Amino acid sequence: MAFVTDRKRAVGLGSAKDGTHHYWSMQVSSWALLILCPLFVLTFGSTLGGTYEEVTATFARPFPALIAALTIWVGFMHFKGGAQVLIEDYTHGATRAALIIGNIFLSYAAAATGVFAIARMAF
């Protein structure tokens, strides 16, 4: 039987040294979405119910296209960070690794698809 203190058991395990970065990236993306979402609703709301030509004409202007692209990109990056925390908290082993890789792939693929769609309408 080994007489090891709790502190001795924890030495060397340390932190991942990534928590502060993750916290600040989630805070920054939250504040960015707090500004971007109302702007997106205002720009997108004016095109709601319009014809295809009206919608493409609206998103052909730089401001609505930029707001939509930033909202999509920042929104999916915020989703990626939040979903990764959930995966890390509730899964273990190979399942965790597979889900984190799938989450990253899904987030970047959806963000790139959304930004590409906005770019296609803008040009």
Image (tube, rainbow, N blue to C red):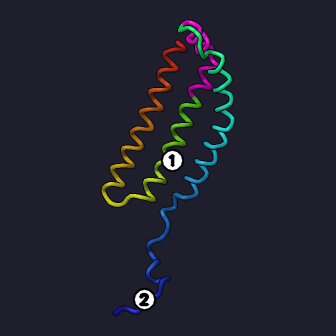
Q: Is residue 56 a member of the stretch shown in magenta?
A: yes
Amino acid carrying mark 2 in the image: Val
Q: Which element is circle 1 on?
A: helix
At 59% from the left and 10% from the top, the residue drawn is 50
Q: Which residue is mark 1?
A: 81
User: Can you tell which of label 2 and label 1 is closer to the viewer?
Assistant: 1
At 52% from the left and 40% from the top, the residue drawn is 77
At 36% from the left and 43% from the top, the residue drawn is 102
Would residue 43 appear left or right of 2 to someone viewing this image? right
Across and down, in percent, residue 21 comes to 56, 53
Please determine whether, in this image, residue 67 is positioned above or below residue 30. above
Q: CA distance from mark 2 to mark 1?
A: 36 Å
Residue 58 occupies which quadrant of the picture? top right
Mark 2 packing: few (<14 Cα in 10 Å), some, or many (20+)? few
Between 13 and 48, the one lying in front of the other is 48
Boundaries of the magenta span: 53-69
Across and down, in percent, residue 42 comes to 68, 23
Q: Residue furthest front?
A: 49
Q: Which residue is mark 2?
A: 4
- Tell me, yes or no, whether the two marked residues, 2 and 1, touch with CB atoms within 8 Å: no
Residue 92 occupies which quadrant of the picture? bottom left
Amino acid carrying mark 1 in the image: Gly
Across and down, in percent, residue 64 comes to 63, 20
Across and down, in percent, residue 46 comes to 66, 17
Q: Which element is circle 2 on?
A: loop
